[in-house]
Amino acid sequence: MHDEKNIERAEIVTVGTEMLLGDLVDTNTVWISQRLAALGVGIYRHTTVGDNSERIVAALREAASRSDLVVTTGGLGPTSDDLTNACLSTLTGREMVEYQEAREHVDTMFERFGRTPTANNYKQALFPEGTQLIPNPVGTAMGALVEWEGTLFATLPGVPTEMKSMFDATLEPLIRARSEGSIVSKTLHFAGIGESALVEKVQEFLDATDPTVAPLAGQGRVRLRITTRAATEREAQEKIAPVEKEVIARLGDYYFGEDDETLEGAVGRLLQERGATLTLAESCTGGLLAKRLTDMPGSSAYFGEGFVTYSNESKEHLLGVPHAMIVDHGAVSEPVARGMAEGARRVSGADYGLSVTGIAGPDGGTEEKPVGLVFVGISDSEATFAEKLDLTAWARSRDSIRERSANRAFDLMRLRLEEN
Amino acid sequence: MHDEKNIERAEIVTVGTEMLLGDLVDTNTVWISQRLAALGVGIYRHTTVGDNSERIVAALREAASRSDLVVTTGGLGPTSDDLTNACLSTLTGREMVEYQEAREHVDTMFERFGRTPTANNYKQALFPEGTQLIPNPVGTAMGALVEWEGTLFATLPGVPTEMKSMFDATLEPLIRARSEGSIVSKTLHFAGIGESALVEKVQEFLDATDPTVAPLAGQGRVRLRITTRAATEREAQEKIAPVEKEVIARLGDYYFGEDDETLEGAVGRLLQERGATLTLAESCTGGLLAKRLTDMPGSSAYFGEGFVTYSNESKEHLLGVPHAMIVDHGAVSEPVARGMAEGARRVSGADYGLSVTGIAGPDGGTEEKPVGLVFVGISDSEATFAEKLDLTAWARSRDSIRERSANRAFDLMRLRLEEN
């Protein structure tokens, strides 16, 4: 391409009235932002506009006046509401012309779906003159790369799977090629420690400018992202390595994984490494732990069955928790958490039993046992124990109590597995 | 307030570097957009900027040039990164002054949390001169209402619970008071029918301009939003009623509820009305149905226990599905779906048993039983039956298969309950 410029600043423009009205959540912008941030590209602004030519052209013009790269999502379909490439043509003054390659792509994709394209569908073969096409391996809508007045425009479809595969295959290599050297970013995950306590232990890295280290906290977990830029990828990795090593050394057991790792992912990995199996006994989380475990493909290797024992009776008849124990201590208590984990392990024959019982609210709290009181139980061949969680600070949010309980339960399970 | 203008067009400006980098998902903008759309206010644009004074001021200025109302979220905290109100002061040329009421509010909230404010915290008492304060019943950050050159600015905090309660208590009544007449909006929910088939049955309402009827589809559900404006709220409701009645009449059993209703909510409501209980036996959904059922406060009234029977063995030993049946038909089959529902009902003593077994992928599919093949089973005192779902079109997305399976399972349960 001509007029190539390094890419330092980017903006994302979302096109779609559904997004503007809040009918659809714009997950694309979050995903693209994370990618651009990891590539070391500065992000200046996100803009969302409806399916209206005048407003799309205005948003594109404004974005171009500020940034080297403008990524758009949405508005590439075959209907009269799909306006993105036509608006790019209006802005740049370059006529819409048919691209043979794009026309053939429409035919190929329709053939694959066993359907016949109508005249409308070939609208997806029209692009501003001078466009470099972005291949779409998944759908009919190819994207456009258009260079104009020092700004590179990239138009991507709104369907997330299509958008992501096109970004990965075409846009990311192009951004890497047009960045000064290589940018490498690594995310480290921690649990069981608050953000401020964690930051205190690694403050000087957060104050440093290269590599940069940025924290982010949520629902009982903290992430640190280490980012640097160097002449080569290897050099960048070599700059990250000592920081990573020292940060992990200082935070020890709080560290549970890097990049896309999750707490349930860490538990799954450790179980697989040990050839062990896990069962669940859930009261207040009501299936949330099981759901998160089975979100992961391949979880059947270590998870065969789980129990949602929401009522007191079910804790007794499914898990064998003694009636007297529930009467004496209440269903939300340390002995019952232990009894649930032990019972689930015994009934299922799994190596590890993990239980949660608590008061997620908004009702059901008492002075003695308030909303936010939760117990996590763990049972294995060597021991059975429970931990009390005080989540009363989140008493106003049932979701937060459930998510934080699940996070802490998986984290305790991870720590237990790492001991064994 | 002086210079009052009707509110017809609005924009939302999100302030926060975490949002720009994709570290936090901006659910606030979705929520505010839905509210504004329901109030009949046109939404022109969403903008996200980082914690940078110059860029925040520019975004506010641009938004004001287009819209009657600019709602901001974020940047109201006590740290040096929190810049929204100061930027509003820069834009309007109105000095930041301390508001006694806001200072006292900081003291009151700190007292409630049992802590002592530092000098920094009183930054949250500073607002541009001429501000009308927006009370915050939940947190320390009050918001500002500032009228400037024909635009009303409303600054709200980024914490969703605080933002929502402030929008509801202060902003919504103000928008209603400053709209031409009343706007009323109603959402009707449907399941078990595709978007195009549904639209065909009610096309003339979608073509009409008053009330407007707009469809939105996702994961096996379709919503229709009916909106109108009239001199009074009652008049608006009277315009909606006949459209609503006719739409529901034409769509019959596909209709399952209005406004915030969900499929699991409809199931819960019907169970409560009948004084009946439900149990679950989940294979491929792995706890997702139980999780969704217990997301709802009060679900213990009709849900006592559920089984996550992920492995074949667990279907046998927990639910009593015959070994030979699994060998003969496979775990993903109609007989096993029936056996799971029946077994769960028998073991739990619940009135209804609901089961799901299928292949969610990405692995585990065969030519005969491909990824996306799912069976839903239902058992009650009168009958036990199963339905086959073909979700092979979503074979690339494990999440879609699981969500759609759960939706269809809840919908079949709803239909069965409505029969009884």
Image: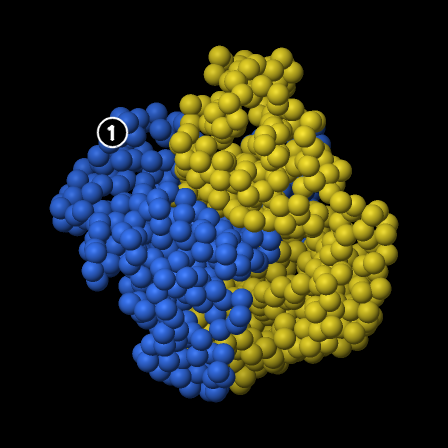
Chain colours: A yellow, B blue
Disc 1, SS: loop
Residue B93's x, y, as percent? 36, 62
In the image, residue B92 sits, relative to residue B395, either above or below, namely: below
Give the amino acid at mark 1: Ala
**Residue highlighted by disc 1:** B208
Most extreme residue toward the front, as rendered? B93
Res. A64 image quadrant: top right
Res. A152 image quadrant: top right
Residue B265 seen in the figure: no
Residue B108's x, y, as percent? 38, 83
Residue sitting at x 45%, y 51%: B59
Q: Nearer the viewer, residue A365 or B227?
A: B227
Q: Nearer the viewer, residue A394 or B388?
A: A394
Q: Is residue A287 left or right of residue A5?
A: left
Other-residue count near label 1 (Cα within 10 Å), few / some / many at <14 / 14–19 / ≥20: few
Residue A371's x, y, as percent? 47, 76
The chain carrying label 1 is B
